[in-house]
Image (cartoon, rainbow, N blue to C red):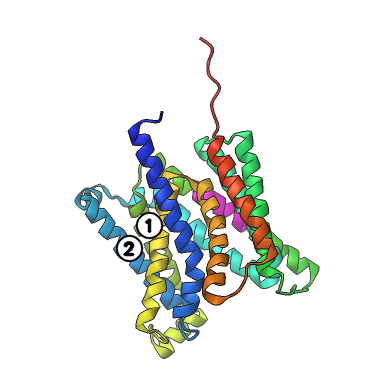
Amino acid sequence: MAPPQSQGMGGRVLFYSILLTLQYGAQPLISKRFIRREVIVTSSVLTCELAKVICAVFFIAKEGSLRRVYKEWTLIGALTASGLPAAIYALQNSLLQISYRNLDSLTFSMLNQTKIIFTAFFTYFILRQKQSIQQIGALFLLIAAAVLLSIGEGSSKGSTGGNADNILFYGIVPVLVASVLSGLASALCQWASQVKKHSSYLMTIEMSMVGSLCLLASTLKSPDGEAIRQHGFFYGWTPLTLIPVISNALGGILVGLVTSYAGGVRKGFVIVSALCVTALLQFIFEGKPPSIYCLAALPLVLISISIYQKYPYLGKKKKS
């Protein structure tokens, strides 16, 4: 029998994981319905980061630890725990944008799923968190499910058919490097929260601020920056635009909590499971039936989650 504290933590992890799965799965439909095409992407992203900060501060205050966090906060601690992951995620996003322009959607999505393996690798390398043979098998099942879901999403989109060298050096290499960086950043966030005991809410605030500063700097030369200067920050917004922005912000909070309590590998299970939720919601609200690939992926996701949870790594007992 697990102790009550362990059972309570497991229940909390399950609760956060279910919420994140639902949020991540519903976000594409919410964004499509409530964000108009005229909305400047940078304005919605910056507003989302601000909403993350406000939500995180609220939750810290609700815990009654706002004053303690304020007194204990240091710039060096913030840069150590959150600065490096934030910089890595910024570089990762840039690489993904380069890759997406030079690869067809199917190849891009399939290669992007390798981040699950790299997350497991860096989690072991940095945190010495080992996986059992069964769990490693479950990870490959999950990747197979993600590839099937990617095929279902990208099969209707044609190949870019570009130059072979461009595809390799500006398509395949960037997305693979981005997957490595994603795994590294996820493991570093888990290290900061579990080893350095850095609050996940505080990490959300710090990473949002670093990301916002980078985004603001980019507006000096980017097309979005020119559009903001020409039309205004909230061009194309309606009151309903706040719905997906706040939903996305809460999703960011949940990502931090799931990474903190369950780890980056389990977060990968949540994200792939959410793709199935998206397909189900599209069928319910848009009448778009799930593809045969989605139907094939669903049992793989369920089986991989069951195996991963049922067969954790057990260290060898020392003989007395």
Q: Who is closer to the viewer here, 213 or 27?
A: 27
Residue 119 appears in the figure: yes
Q: Quadrant of residue 59?
A: bottom left
Identified by mark 1, the residue type is Thr
Contact check, label 1 and label 2, Cβ < 8 Å: yes
How many C-alpha atoms fall within 10 Å of the one at disc 1: few (<14), some, or many (≥20)? many
Helix, strand or loop status at disc 1: helix
User: Measuring 50% from the left and 62% from the top, which residue is drawn there?
Assistant: 90
Is residue 183 found inside the magenta-colored segment of the image?
Answer: yes
* Main SS class of the magenta portion in the image: helix
Amino acid bearing label 2: Val
The disc placed on residue 53 is 2
Image coordinates of residue 108 in percent, x first then y, are 67, 64
Residue sitting farthest toward the right: 164
Q: Which residues are magenta?
A: 176-187
Q: Is residue 111 visible?
A: no
**Residue at left 34%, top 54%?**
201
Give the residue drawn at x 55%, y 56%. 273
Q: Which mark is residue 204?
A: 1
Task: Check residue 178 for magenta coloring.
Answer: yes
Q: CA distance from mark 1 to mark 2?
A: 7 Å
In this rendering, the answer to whether 218 lies above or below 150 is below
> Is 263 or 79 nearer to us in this picture?
263
Above or below, 158 relative to 253: below
Q: Earlier in the sequence, mark 1 or mark 2?
A: 2
Q: Is residue 144 left or right of residue 242?
A: right
Question: Residue 137 appears in which quarter of the rendering?
Answer: top right
Q: Residues within 10 Å of mark 2 (few under 14, many from 20)?
A: many
x, y percent for residue 311 = 56, 35
- Quadrant in which the N terminus is drawn: top left
Q: Residue at x 38, y 62 (%)?
A: 250
